[in-house]
Image (cartoon, grey):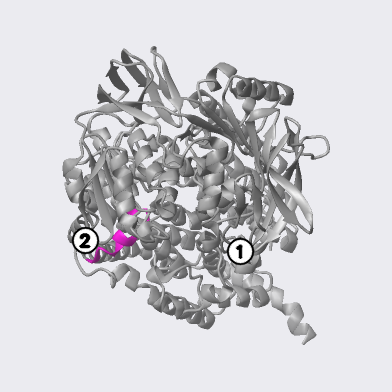
């Protein structure tokens, strides 16, 4: 036995030499691309006839983007700066990675007159390109037959199908095509340490970043784990560090696009409520039968992949172990338990289930590099992998699609009333449905038939009005209909379609309340069905608004208070020192919650001066910032102390009587809040353990009112009538009061490089989303993410902000990559070192 153990490495070395000397079956280079092309064509035909891809969350948005780029190119504009049709105007080439748009534009060109014809061609490209990459890698690793098989299999891996058909994340599908090549380049460098591989690795990763920046970041995290595992197993710390540096520099190569994209003026969507959907039980990730009940198969890693990874960890004798270990670690990080841990970490990983395709690529690549595995085991694993992918095939076959895509879109248009509403739209259409239709709604409005401008869009990260439209969806869900229609008017929508089914607690007379709120803002009901209601404003042509708000809200809680009291203006800056006395004295009420300040004394002096001039100041005590020295919370002499309640408030004793409130809503049973000390006149107290705690009253004078117990947030959650009246008394405004808006007609023309607006009034809100790329010789300004102009002809041109810095980053990364590669070349003896990290 000892003798056999001593001879085993010799046998492995002989096997390696035999593999190296074996003649490659080069006929596969001619045969396999033909077979791949034929399979891709059949696949595209199936996809085209099934129409299942319409269920993809973001599919139609990416198709719209490719179609819009194609139209711009046909007019001679290779890099369109602006698109006016979606989200009140967006810069989608700036904020969305450019490579997918150009690929889809080519598919749109090849697809003929039908813009949707681009998707089957895109599927063809994804399948064919991914297969060719695996075939190439197979030849490079002297295992062409396994590489050819993986070329067929890769497209049909369940996680990849889910990304393409269920999520509709076409840019991520492009990254998934590149993954095997990235794996090969990293593996090749770790094995041979040839300095010329580093620029290739950086360029390949830079291309990945230009396909999907966020997913490129996920890939970098996964490769970091891979490099750590390789360094632990093989001791190849230097090689791993050099490969990782090359990948980081690959990010820098994309700087000309990346820097303007990351430094733009878009408003980030609040996605924290969705991230829990990207962790799941490991049983769901490995249960092969779960796909029978999941729409699109769900996030399924694969039992066969997991079995192969564990098999490789224990039996590959350190051959290919880093990739197997990395895949298992990633899988464990996608579990619900890991999600609870990450939720407590600042900046912890999110969207973890989207790492599954990366983990799958690592397992399959390690299977390909495991050249000592006997043929019987190779065949067995190939059969298991193929069998494990079979239950996901109905996603491609379209078992959920009963009609052609055109018929399904027509059905959506009729059911949502969008077809009728489009015909009546003069300026812009607001479709408020809580993101139920996602990209389908945007496609129906901006791409299907005769397009109209809309605020609706699937890729909300490209819009500077993300916060505004999230507010509208929250207002619809909460039943804040006055706010909903007033802000639709603010954003220039003469047509509004609302999904009444998105209201959380409809209650009695919900539709009557909605119709009444619409009428108060000037909209009339045109048509309705069981789920949707279509409203129209009597306005012709292009128009803006001139608005007078009674109150202004400053701080992080402005969104909540504005939905409850629509006559309050929302603001962008939370810092009190950013506002002047002259600016705020034009309002009757200033509401402060979650505000900040650089100079507390100056802020207090301005607020006190405003109150003495007759402006009502209402301060939410829970939103008073903590002092930097000691953590005390106080403002204008009022200080906050912590208190907690369970299930509900005790009786609130106020100047208007005892207030018996509703219980705290589900999920908020433990209520951590503050009461207020230092009030000059106490208007309300609460009893806690026989202590009378003041929570409501005035400081300095009767115009400065402080409210504790987080009552404004509680009112937003419950709509408690008694608390509403208490807040109404404090603010001296009514929840049913709207700002005064006057419609002002203007003329607007859009050109590829400019927007020209002619208006006869000053300080007019155009309803056009404001971007930091807007420049003009005339006065323009931003207010609540919207563009305001003066009483003249205003020409707004599109600059390219941060482009110089981006080019500098790309140039610097190129220079650093060259210097780094030459440094490694010198350290490794001009590439002659051929150490093996096995």
State the image coordinates of residue 591 (x, y, percent, origin top left).
57, 34
- Residue lying farthest right? 630
Compared across the picture, whether 103 is left or right of 49 comes to: right
State the image coordinates of residue 448 (x, y, percent, origin top left).
21, 47
**Magenta segment: does it hold 600?**
no
State the image coordinates of residue 487 (x, y, percent, origin top left).
38, 38
Frontmost residue, 304 versus 215 = 215
- Residue lying farthest bottom? 1
Q: Residue at x 52, y 29 (%)?
A: 806
Frontmost residue, 473 versus 124 = 473
Q: Quadrant of residue 739?
A: top left
Question: Magenta part mainly helix, strand or loop?
Answer: helix
* Residues packed near mark 1 inside 10 Å, few (<14), some (14 to 19) or many (20 plus): many
- Quadrant occupied by the C terminus: bottom right
Q: Disc 2 and disc 1: Cα gap in Å?
A: 38 Å
Q: Mark 2 = which residue?
A: 408
Q: Mark 1 = which residue?
A: 330
- Quadrant occupied by the N terminus: bottom right
Frontmost residue, 663 versus 82 = 663
Please, is residue 126 above or below residue 578 in the view? below
Q: Quadrant of residue 46?
A: bottom left
Describe the element under mark 2 as helix, strand or loop: helix
State the image coordinates of residue 47 (x, y, percent, origin top left).
26, 64
Compared across the picture, whether 444 is left or right of 660 comes to: left
Frontmost residue, 696 versus 604 = 696
Describe the element under mark 1 as helix, strand or loop: helix
Is residue 430 visible in the rendered image? The answer is no
Compared across the picture, whether 317 is left or right of 247 comes to: right
- The span picked out in magenta is 50-60
Q: Residue at x 70, y 43 (%)?
A: 829
């Amino acid at each position: 036995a000892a003798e056999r153990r001593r001879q085993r490495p010799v046998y492995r070395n002989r096997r390696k030499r035999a593999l190296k000397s074996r003649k490659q079956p080069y006929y596969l280079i001619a045969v396999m691309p033909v077979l791949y092309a034929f399979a891709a064509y059949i696949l595209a035909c199936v996809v085209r006839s099934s129409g299942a891809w319409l269920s993809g969350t973001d599919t139609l948005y990416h198709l719209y983007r490719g179609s819009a780029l194609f139209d711009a190119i046909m007019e001679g504009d290779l890099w369109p700066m602006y698109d006016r049709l979606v989200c009140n105007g967006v810069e989608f080439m700036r904020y969305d990675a450019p490579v997918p748009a150009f690929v889809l534009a080519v598919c749109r060109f090849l697809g003929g007159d039908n813009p949707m014809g681009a998707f089957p061609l895109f599927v063809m490209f994804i399948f064919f390109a991914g297969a060719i990459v695996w075939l190439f890698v197979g030849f490079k690793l002297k295992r062409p037959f396994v590489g050819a098989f993986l070329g067929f299999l890769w497209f049909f891996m369940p996680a990849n199908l889910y990304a393409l058909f269920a999520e509709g994340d076409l840019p991520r599908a492009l990254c998934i095509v590149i993954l095997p090549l990235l794996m090969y380049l990293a593996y090749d460098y770790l094995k041979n340490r040839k300095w010329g591989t580093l620029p290739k690795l950086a360029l390949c990763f830079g291309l990945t970043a230009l396909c999907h920046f966020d997913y490129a970041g996920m890939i970098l995290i996964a490769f970091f784990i891979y490099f750590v595992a390789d360094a632990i197993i093989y001791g190849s710390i230097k090689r791993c560090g050099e490969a990782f540096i090359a990948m980081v520099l690959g990010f820098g190569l994309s700087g000309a696009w990346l820097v303007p994209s990351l430094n733009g003026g878009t408003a980030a969507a609040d996605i924290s409520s969705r991230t829990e959907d990207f962790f799941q039980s490991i049983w769901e990730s490995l249960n092969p039968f779960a796909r029978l009940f999941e729409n699109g198969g769900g996030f399924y890693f694969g039992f066969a992949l997991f079995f192969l990874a564990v098999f490789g960890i224990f039996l590959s004798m350190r051959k290919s172990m880093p990739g197997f270990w990395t895949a298992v670690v990633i899988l464990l990080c996608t579990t619900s338990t890991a999600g609870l841990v990450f939720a407590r970490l600042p900046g912890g990983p999110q969207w973890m289930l989207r790492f599954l395709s990366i983990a799958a690529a690592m397992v399959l690549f390690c299977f390909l590099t495991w050249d000592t595995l006997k043929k019987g085991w190779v065949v067995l694993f190939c059969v298991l992998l193929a069998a494990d992918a079979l239950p996901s095939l109905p996603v491609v076959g379209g078992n959920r699609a009963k009609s052609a895509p055109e018929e399904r879109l027509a059905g959506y248009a009729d059911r949502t009333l969008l077809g009728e509403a489009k015909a009546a739209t003069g300026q812009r259409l607001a479709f408020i449905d809580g993101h139920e239709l996602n990209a389908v709604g945007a496609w129906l409005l901006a791409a299907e038939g005769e397009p109209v401008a809309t605020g609706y869009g699937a890729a909300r990260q490209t819009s500077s009005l993300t916060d505004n439209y999230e507010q509208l969806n929250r207002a619809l869900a909460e039943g804040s209909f006055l706010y909903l229609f007033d802000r639709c008017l603010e954003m220039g929508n003469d047509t509004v379609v609302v999904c009444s089914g998105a209201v959380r607690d409809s209650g009695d007379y919900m539709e009557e309340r909605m119709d009444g709120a619409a009428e108060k803002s000037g909209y009339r009901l045109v048509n309705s069905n069981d789920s949707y209601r279509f409203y129209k404003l009597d306005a012709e042509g292009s128009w803006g608004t001139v608005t007078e708000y009674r109150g202004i809200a400053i701080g992080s809680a402005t969104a909540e208070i504005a939905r409850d009291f629509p006559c309050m203006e929302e603001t962008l800056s939370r810092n009190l020192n950013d506002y002047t006395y002259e600016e705020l004295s034009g309002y009757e009420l200033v509401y402060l919650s979650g505000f900040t300040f650089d100079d507390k004394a100056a802020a207090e002096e301005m607020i006190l001066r405003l109150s003495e001039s007759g402006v009502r100041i209402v301060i939410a005590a829970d939103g008073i910032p903590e002092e930097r020295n000691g953590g005390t919370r106080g403002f204008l002499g009022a200080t906050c102390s912590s208190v907690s309640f369970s299930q509900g408030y005790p009786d609130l004793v106020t100047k208007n009587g005892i207030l018996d409130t509703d219980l705290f809503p589900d999920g908020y049973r433990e209520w951590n809040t503050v009461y207020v000390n230092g009030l000059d006149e106490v208007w309300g107290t609460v009893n806690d353990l026989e202590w009378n705690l003041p929570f409501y009253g005035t400081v300095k004078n009767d115009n400065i009112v402080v409210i504790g117990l987080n009552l404004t947030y509680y009112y937003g959650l419950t709509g408690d009538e008694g608390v509403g009246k208490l807040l109404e008394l404090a603010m001296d405004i009514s929840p049913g009061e709207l700002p005064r808006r006057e419609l002002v007609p203007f003329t607007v023309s859009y050109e590829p490089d400019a927007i020209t607006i002619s208006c006869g009034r000053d300080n007019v809100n155009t309803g056009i989303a404001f971007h930091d790329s807007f420049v003009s010789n005339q006065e323009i300004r931003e207010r609540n993410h919207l563009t305001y102009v003066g009483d003249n002809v205003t020409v707004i041109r599109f600059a390219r902000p941060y482009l110089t810095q981006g080019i500098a980053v790309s140039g610097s990364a190129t220079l650093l990559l060259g210097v780094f590669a030459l440094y490694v070349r010198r350290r490794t003896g001009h590439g002659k070192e051929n150490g093996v990290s096995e």
